[in-house]
Image: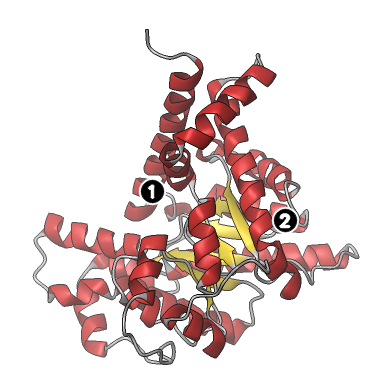
């Protein structure tokens, strides 16, 4: 990584001042290189982001997808597309390997998400997670925080896979996922395996929780101070973070799905991961923001009181607000899973248009 020229600004300053680390919310190689120059030490991805990256660079990926298809004449569109995603992930992981080695596996991770079409089978998710785990030493695998996903998370962790919990928006989901990871780590230790270089993280998709609160308020004609709606995700992360610290969970929280600048500023100083899209990183780094510790500052009680008027906020915020069985049907979870499934279909169409162009 010696060729990286670090870029001064709030992002790099924050990475030097705090345990809070920056990951790029994309595995696009050009964006990732620039994010590393800002102090970035990881990257996350999902089906929608992977599709966007492949679509953004047709000059690179059209011939590569065609070559994959030519080399594997019996493969389906889905198999071809997922091979392209795996190839892209391996190349991105190589950029992050120096940070992985320097942190003994805590950072320098590249996320690969399991196929959402496998979401009904814990074994299929864990098997694919193990496959992705072997793509590169510094891969972390995304599994959704559903009832089936929680089972897969524990199983995959027991097999030695570092997990990035996804499709997660709430305190109950984060706690169940962290506990499942802890059980998997305990089982692995009991079997005599070293877990010191595993680097699990538990995502809370802050902006998607905010989006859902806004949708519910509009749907149900709730009268509240709308400025509070920018703070639902932040409140959930800060609540979960305190419990993680109390219980001593190995996993770190990861903040994703940015919608406003608070989704970066409010978590500085915490021992967690912030994963903004690259455009947000540029926005922050080009600003005159003065870096300060804000993780320990609680969300205003006024905002909490306003948000408490929304039943789904209470479900997301209270430790026992949802059962495991309810995770998949929680509004933002169902919406996100459907979006990821649609991205899989989009990837199939992209491959189809390359290997069988319209006449």
268 up-or-down from 278: above or below: below
Residue at horizontal 14 percent and vertical 55 percent from the top = 219
Residue 225 or 47: which is nearer the viewer?
47
Left or right placement of residue 219 versus residue 342 in this view: left
Q: Which mark is residue 182?
A: none
Tell me the quarter of the image containing the N terminus.
bottom right
Q: Residue furthest top?
A: 359
Left or right placement of residue 2 versus residue 77 in this view: right
Residue at horizontal 36 percent and vertical 66 percent from the top = 280
Q: Residue furthest right?
A: 192
**What kind of element bears circle 1?**
helix
**What kind of element bears circle 2?**
loop
Q: Residues within 10 Å of mark 1 (few under 14, many from 20)?
A: some
308 up-or-down from 294: above or below: above
Residue at horizontal 85 percent and vertical 68 percent from the top = 194
Q: Residues within 10 Å of mark 2 (few under 14, many from 20)?
A: many
Tag 2–tag 1 contact (CB < 8 Å) = no
Q: Position of residue 11 (x, y in %)?
A: 45, 78
Question: Which residue has dot 2 on it?
Answer: 161
Q: Which mark is residue 336?
A: 1
Alpha-carbon span between mark 2 and mark 1: 24 Å
Tell me the quarter of the image containing the C terminus.
top left
Q: Position of residue 221 (x, y in %)?
A: 9, 61
User: Tag 1 or tag 2, which sits nearer the N-term?
Assistant: 2
Residue at horizontal 38 percent and vertical 92 percent from the top = 297
Residue 265 or 158: which is nearer the viewer?
265
């Amino acid at each position: 990584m010696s060729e990286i020229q670090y870029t001064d600004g709030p992002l790099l300053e924050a990475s030097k001042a705090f345990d809070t680390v920056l990951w790029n919310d994309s595995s696009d190689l050009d964006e990732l290189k620039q994010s590393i120059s800002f102090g970035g030490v990881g990257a996350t991805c999902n089906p929608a982001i992977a599709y966007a990256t492949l679509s953004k660079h047709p000059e690179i990926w059209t011939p590569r997808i065609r070559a994959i298809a030519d080399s594997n004449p019996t493969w389906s569109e889905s198999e071809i597309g997922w091979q392209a995603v795996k190839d892209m992930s391996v190349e991105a992981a190589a950029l992050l390997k120096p940070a992985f080695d320097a942190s003994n596996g805590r950072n320098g991770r590249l996320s690969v998400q399991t196929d959402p079409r496998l979401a009904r089978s814990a074994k299929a998710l864990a098997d694919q997670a193990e496959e992705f785990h072997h793509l590169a030493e510094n891969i972390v695998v995304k599994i959704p925080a559903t009832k089936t996903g929680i089972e897969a998370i524990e199983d995959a962790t027991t097999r030695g896979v570092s997990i990035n919990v996804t499709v997660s928006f709430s305190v109950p989901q984060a706690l169940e996922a962290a506990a499942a990871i802890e059980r998997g780590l305990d089982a692995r230790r009991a079997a005599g395996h070293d877990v010191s270089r595993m680097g699990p993280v538990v995502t809370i998709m802050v902006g998607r929780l905010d989006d859902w609160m806004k949708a519910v308020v509009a749907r149900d004609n709730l009268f509240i101070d709308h400025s509070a709606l920018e703070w639902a995700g932040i409140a959930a992360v800060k609540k979960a973070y305190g419990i993680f610290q109390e219980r001593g969970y190995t996993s770190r929280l990861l903040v994703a799905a940015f919608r406003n600048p608070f989704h970066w500023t409010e978590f500085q100083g915490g021992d967690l991961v912030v994963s903004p899209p690259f455009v947000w990183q540029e926005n922050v780094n080009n600003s005159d923001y003065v870096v300060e510790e804000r993780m320990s500052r609680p969300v205003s009680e006024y905002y909490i009181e306003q948000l408490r008027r929304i039943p789904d906020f209470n479900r997301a915020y209270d430790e026992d607000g949802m059962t495991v069985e309810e995770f998949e049907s929680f509004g933002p979870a169902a919406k996100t899973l459907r979006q990821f499934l649609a991205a899989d279909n989009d990837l199939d169409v992209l491959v189809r248009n390359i290997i069988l162009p319209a006449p």
